[in-house]
Amino acid sequence: MPFWAIAPYKIVLFYRYVKVDIPEELKLAIEKKCSALCMVGRVLVAEEGINGTLAAPATAMQEFIAFMESDKRFECGKVDWKYSNCEATPTNAPFPNLSVRVKTSIISVGLPRHVETIASHIEYDPNTFGGLRGTGEHLSPTEFHHAVETSNIDNDPNVMLIDIRNKFEYDIGHFRNAKTVGTMTYADTWKQLDNIVGLEDIGAGKKVRRARARLERREKRARLDNEIDESSKKDSITEQNNVQTINSNECVSNATVAAADKTVFMYCTGGIRCEKASAYLKAKGVGKVYQLQGGIHRYLEEYGTQQNDAAAPSTNLPKLEQSADVSDKICTTSVKNDAKSLFIGKNYVFDCRTQAMGGCFDDKNTSSVTDIGLEDTSLSAHSESVKKSIHTTTIGSCVYCDGAQDTYNGHIACCVCRLPVLVCDSCVAGNIYREFHCETHVYLKDIYYAVLDVFTEDELLLQRENLDKMIHEKYLAKSNLMDNSTRKDRKRRKMLKNQIDKIDAVLEKRRAGHGPDANIMTPQVAYWIKYQKRTIVDEQKDDACVD
């Protein structure tokens, strides 16, 4: 029987840093057990531990937890199993399948120098919450709430609250006064953390950049003119010494002194990203680093996301129950604390729900796990009540019209980077190509598309012309200004050139008499055929009928 035929089912989020000598062996054991229980989800296994999100009927989930806790490395009390309830149907499964993989790490850090910085400050410790020693101090949701509320985050530049999640997660929900690292992936976190916390002296940094720019301009002129004489060499050596002196004497020492006076609070969805992020800041010399134990998930179990102003009227509840979509189900526990929540908006989750909301709750409309006959076990002790959201603050906005929007559609992703895109219903309806662009790539909305088969030859030529124009005017012209070309510009230029190559390949096939492959039916092409009644084949037939 498929798992969605047994309702309700559980989603569990978990991680643990622990030494795994043979990751492949653990991977096979987990994969075998999950397959036998008809579970779906994602699990990463590495020498440093385990990280996963799984979905299954409640009874199957209970059996899986018992199986994992029979292993000494994950025995009862060592893993923080974070549960939530959700509904599933054959067309709305939380995950498409089961994937258990062996990786080099359970969460990618990125560049080797960042890996080394973090590794130098942490070690395994089975007695700690996450399994690591050398991270920031773990605060329970209540402790974190009180510490953040009483800290002078608004006025003291040395006290800050940082959201370690990606920008698309932050956009639909975050703690009040939190700063976002603004990243697309976790591997981009470290440079942003340096900038936010101020681990380099700003004044010294400007001096370094100016000195390097002067040096580069001088050397480039000398190479072009082929006139490097002794005086210019001496000037170059002097400039290099100035850069080194600034780096060593001002930048490093000032940053170290400043870092010791900093107080940083941080949080993420479930806690795993904060483990290494807090260790990174500690390794950099930041004085006080605190992280939310269990992440937003645990915080919403305690506080939900209650509004500071008027609560929504209970008379709206029956209407909401009839029209609410599955993605609008609350997957948090009943609010245990009457204090006003510091978290506003929705919590982004990586399954079919996309976002799990807190809100002002009506206790008359709950469906606890005990209602379906679960025994009073460790699973039911951690279980949650599924509730409807009556009112939440909408803090996100549509990338196209800036209208209020805080719900991601799981089928809408950026056609350039494949990240989720916040788009309102009216903008979705008005997008005839059914291709969308995120905030980073919205400047390409009229010239960059993933599916090219739906366009005529003239439209493709216009796209190509605009792409080529953008390359020359925005990036090549900028790169000619010696010290203004960046690595990001070069990557974008390469991306646009690759798109031009794709357009050329489609045009070449068209001119050779080969139309689009009928066997390749993407959602965009299917929509085009169904609603726009326009295909390349139809156009070719129309052209053939013209006298």
Image: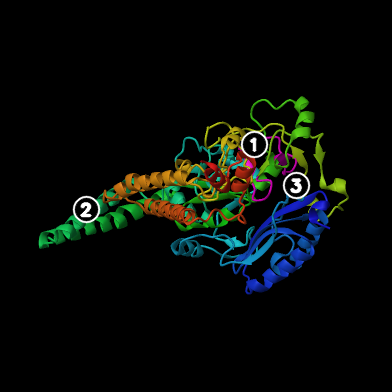
- Which tag is nearer the camera, tag 1 or tag 3? 3
Q: Which numbered disc flags the more N-terminal residue, 2 or 3?
A: 3
Mark 1, residue position: 341
Query: In front here: 289 or 46?
Result: 46
Given contact means CB atoms under 8 Å apart, are the residues at marks 1 and 3 in contact? no
Q: In this picture, is 232 found above or below 363? A: below
Q: Which numbered disc flags the more N-terminal residue, 2 or 1?
A: 2
Given contact means CB atoms under 8 Å apart, are the residues at marks 2 and 3 in contact? no
- Amino acid type indicated by mark 1: Ser
Q: Residue at x 71, y 67 (%)?
A: 31
Residue 459: give x, y in percent of width and height: 46, 43
Q: Secondary structure at mark 3?
A: strand
Q: Residue at x 53, y 32 (%)?
A: 401
Q: Is residue 396 visible?
A: no
Mark 3, residue position: 86
Mark 2, residue position: 217
Please tell me whether residue 329 belongs to the stretch shown in magenta.
yes
Residue 391: give x, y in percent of width and height: 68, 31
Determine the image quadrant of residue 322. Answer: top right
Residue 41: give x, y in percent of width and height: 69, 57
Q: Which residues are magenta?
A: 328-354
Q: Quadrant of the N terminus?
A: bottom right
* Distance from Cα at disc 2 to Cα at disc 3: 60 Å
- Amino acid type indicated by mark 3: Cys
- Amino acid type indicated by mark 2: Arg
Residue 217 relative to residue 151: left or right: left
Q: In this picture, is 36 found above or below 54? A: below
Please tell me whether residue 531 belongs to the stretch shown in magenta.
no
* Distance from Cα at disc 2 to Cα at disc 1: 54 Å
Query: In front here: 455 or 159?
Result: 455
Residue 258: give x, y in percent of width and height: 40, 48
